[in-house]
Image (cartoon, rainbow, N blue to C red):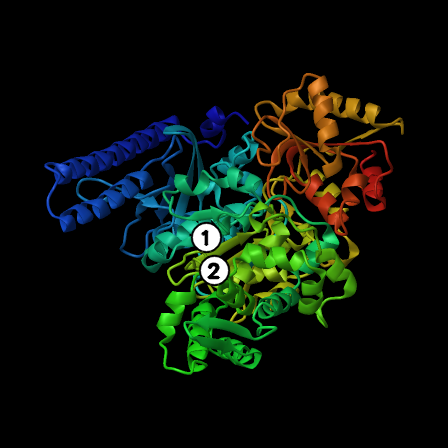
Amino acid sequence: MDLLSTASEVGVPDSDLQAEQAYVDYAHTCLEDTRRRIRAFWERVTHGAGGTHAARYERDVLEHRVFQRLGQLELGGRSLCFGRIDTAADGGDGSETFYIGRIGVWDEDQSAVVCDWRAPVAEPFFRATGRQPLGLARRRRFVSRGRRLLGLDDEHFSPGGTDGALGDNLALQAALDAPRTGRLGDVTATIAAEQDDVIRAPLPGVLIVQGGPGTGKTVVALHRAAYLIYTHRFPLAGQGVLVIGPNPTFLTYVEQVLPSLGEAGVRLATLGDLLEGVPVSGHDAEPVARTKGDARMATVLRRAVRTRQRPLRAPLVLDYGLQRLRLSTEASAAIVAGARRRSRTHNGGRRFVTAAFYEALAASARRPVEPDALAEAFGETLDVRRALDWMWPQLTPAHLLHDLFGSRALLAAAGAGVLSDAETDGLHRARRVHADDVVWSADDVPLLDEARMLLGPRTARGKGGRIRTYGHIVVDEAQELSPMQLRMVGRRSLNGSLTLVGDIAQATSAWAHDSWDSLVELVSPEAPPRFAELTIGYRVPQPIMNFAAACLPPELADLVPPRAARPGGEPPRLVRLPAAGSGSLAGAVADAVRGELPHAGAGNLAVICAEEQVAELSGALTAAGVAHGASARRALGTQVSVCSARTLKGLEVDAAVVVEPRRIAAESEAGMRLLYVALSRATRRLTVTTGEPLPEPLEQAATAIGG
């Protein structure tokens, strides 16, 4: 659809378009005036800088707030105003008009020119329907590019009305038809009623949001973070909001959304990012990943710490002047037992052990001696350091896990009666020269975090063991979280306020859940969680959605795929190849990409394959002269990308070429769900290229479309 013709298509007079353009221009003028007043205020404050330390501190605080406010007013080329709502006349009261936009804008008299989309007055703009107009007589949506209006879309409400078709929203249709760029687009103006219900849900407690492909789960997650900070500025501005994504590709995909909404203070992170200074790369094999994610590992780690708290194996004898001091094994055992009773964390107990150690030595002297004098005399001697490090070593999480996984004896002691022999063997790995040389897997991250909680800081003022908490946490792709990962998330929640967003049908990790019930039991909130479901798919056309849904396994038969907002669209195209080796497959994929690029236009295209095929197919595209990207961290950074299905979880592309579905399905125990993910990424066109038979459910779906 040509956006420039939108106004005439819906019967809105050109004079209305001109009047609304004038209002938008006025709103931008008011916004620039606000920026100018803030800058002028700051220049007056900083004129003649100097003064007392307190004055300089106040200026620093003020500077932070000034530039934070200027950042909130920065649009970055995005549209300021989404549209307007006209309320219905009520008795003797006349109709009111409110313009709704990305941020609030006021004129010099502090009259509202544009209302922030998060304000209560803006709710009807997103929630009103024909059956429930919420007091509106008309909703007018703007179709715009930057500050230029391209069209208007009017929706009139009357008592006893009915809901319109999804396709009647031309602003939404324009957003859906816009090409993908590798970054999540600007969709605030087209937030739908069921999405808005989730975004504006109350802050306290745990909210679980189920939504299939293209239902806008990520949009909801990010906008909920922005809404909560706006609505609960105090206390969330101080407590902070954390958004956890599944991988670095996801963070790159969404990193511009919150700043565009005026909220740059929200932290975006993967679980690995929450452990600063820890190198993380890759995943373990599924059996090992499942063991590491099991809640039983909390017990194993507690035991691993306890095994490092032990009495001396032989008495310690020290010469002190003409005296001989002695610490018996029984006395050392009593010291360790006392430290266990009194210490909240392992490293915190070292001070008690050290003090009790010198007190016991002093008590063994024939003539009075002060423990402090012994500490000064022996503190740096090798024998004493060895004795203390044996009884109660100071540990980092990396040292604890490195020692544990590198020793079959330590693993056997910590896992006795908890882990099977096979699970224990799976955890064992060769030791490196030093724990700092280890590159940890993503599956190690929650274990390192659990260890950090158990160990605490190595020194009284150390920061390494302190865990940052947040007033609200939003987790995307939450269905992938293992029990240990959920413990890690919960540890960062200040008050149990979380939003968990995901799709059970797309659970493909080693800890793939079959229902939210099993995950809810692991979250263990103080109050039962609330549930919400997103039922409308805005991204995937119905023919592609139907084809992908054939991959849903029998255990998810009760899960209803989303209803597509776009019932039309091209059916998937199936390219079958003779079983003639990888050369013909690679060439066919290159041909498919060249054939699809003209249809993608300015949009992007992804070749989606099994992890083991990424390098091969990337080489084929290079040989064919097709510029592309193949790095998981930079997926979708170029128009053409070669990616595994896992890399593209939660992301979308205009066109997808899915290669060898059977190989994708064979990558994991949840392989058909992974294939479901791969087949549901495309917003326009889907091509399936294969030289092998399709999995049986998909073969039946292909037959139904004549493939």
- Image point (47%, 60%), residue name: 492
315 is higher (above) or lower (below) than 81: below
In the displayed structure image, the side of residue 551 where residue 367 appears, left or right = left
Q: Are marks 1 and 2 in contact (CB under 8 Å)?
A: yes
Residue 479 horizontal/vertical position (percent): 62, 55
Residue 439 horizontal/vertical position (percent): 60, 45
Residue 658, numbered circle: none
- Image point (48%, 45%), residue name: 191
621 is higher (above) or lower (below) than 429: above
Quadrant placement of the C terminus: top right
Cα distance, mark 1 to mark 2?
9 Å
Q: Nearer the viewer, residue 536 or 71?
A: 71
In the displayed structure image, the side of residue 511 where residue 472 appears, left or right = left
In the displayed structure image, the side of residue 249 where residue 687 appears, left or right = right
- Image point (68%, 52%), residue name: 509
Q: Secondary structure at mark 1?
A: strand
Q: Which residue is mark 1?
A: 242
Disc 1 residue crowd, few under 14, some 14–19, many 20+, Cα 10 Å: many
Q: Which residue is mark 2?
A: 492
Q: Amino acid at mark 1?
A: Leu
Q: Nearer the viewer, residue 215 or 123?
A: 215
Q: Secondary structure at mark 2?
A: loop
Sequence-first tag of 1 and 2: 1
540 is higher (above) or lower (below) than 18: below
